[in-house]
Amino acid sequence: MNCQDCSEKLDRYVDRELNDTEVLELQLHLEGCPHCEDHYEFQAHLKRLVRHSCDCDTAPPAFREKLRQILS
Amino acid sequence: MAESPARTAFAEEALTHLDTLYRGALRLTRDPDQAQDLVQEAYLRALRYQHSYQQGTNMKAWLFAIMRNLFWDRFKGSRKEDVSLDDVGEFVLYDKLRDEGAKPEEDVLNKLAASEVVEAVEKLPPLHREVVLLVDVEGFSYKDAAQTLGVPIGTVMSRLHRARQQLQKSLYDYAVESGIVHTGGMKQVPQQ
């Protein structure tokens, strides 16, 4: 695997959508390529940042209770 | 009239996914009141059509699909509008920041405020925003996201890729505007 192949598969690696063989190939490349390894760490960090920034909103308790009453 | 145990059990299980639906509705409508209206309508519709839900399948995905379909029907009027995404080309934030002389993680990602990230997500066109919400925020697999959105997996992947490009461009623009980075090299900030 070269850096171009790695770059093309990085989204799916970060999203855990590669098969076992592809994961092994990509991990082997990352172990020997600091640039791609840093790029991967950055992409994974960015994904975590998006999740943590957006998942802190929860339904207001009063709304939850209102729904519970409507649905029961 | 007393409700049936089956209906009560269904409602209870459905309500365990309320936060996911509320977050999704909030990001799609960008308005707490509209989000509550949308979610309430989605739950009422889910209850009405609970016979079409197959036990053992992904209820969260099923509920989210009902909610986002209502969003497109009621809040947008047409699925054809507001779906375009400016072509930012292959914008790779990591490479861009390296070119600017920044340490991408330490100098930039660690300094971005959550509110700015949320704003960047909300600036995405809804068709792209909802893919980011499902895959990045709620952790859906591509397959579940495709099923929820009623599109092929390839469409999920292409929308996600373009959404991330746009998201990275927005975050870069914010980093430049706020002085975290500036074109031509990193801003020198005195150590405290």
Image (cartoon, rainbow, N blue to C red):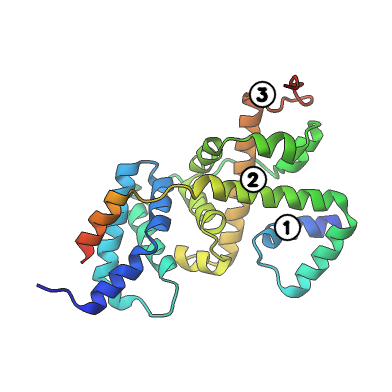
- Identity, as a three-letter code, of the amino acid under mark 3: Gly
Quadrant housing residue A72: bottom left
Q: Chain of mark 1?
A: A
Task: Give the mark nearest the N terminus, 3 or 2.
Answer: 2
Number of residues whose C-alpha sits closer than 10 Å to that of mark 1, classed few (under 14), some (14–19) or many (20 or more):
many
- Nearest the camera: B93 or B136? B136
Distance Cα–Cα, label 1 vs label 3: 29 Å
| Residue B37 can be seen, yes or no | no
Quick one: which residue is furthest to the right in this view?
Answer: A32
Helix or strand or loop: what does disc 3 sit on? Answer: loop
Q: Is residue B110 left or right of residue B113?
A: right
Quick one: which residue is furthest to the front in this view?
Answer: B192
Q: Is residue A72 left or right of residue B52?
A: left
Q: Is residue A20 left or right of residue B77?
A: right
Q: Chain of mark 2?
A: B
Q: Is residue B171 left or right of residue B4?
A: right
Distance Cα–Cα, label 3 vs label 2: 21 Å
| Residue B112 can be seen, yes or no | yes
The C terminus of chain B: image quadrant: top right
Helix or strand or loop: what does disc 1 sit on? Answer: helix
Nearest to the eye among marks 2 and 1: give it: 1
| Mark drawn on residue B165 | 2
- Identity, as a three-letter code, of the amino acid under mark 1: Leu
Q: Are marks 2 and 1 on the same chain?
A: no
| Mark drawn on residue A10 | 1
Residue that label 3 marks: B179
- Identity, as a three-letter code, of the amino acid under mark 2: Gln
- Nearest the camera: B40 or B169? B40
Residue B84 image offset from top left, x and y in percent: 51, 45
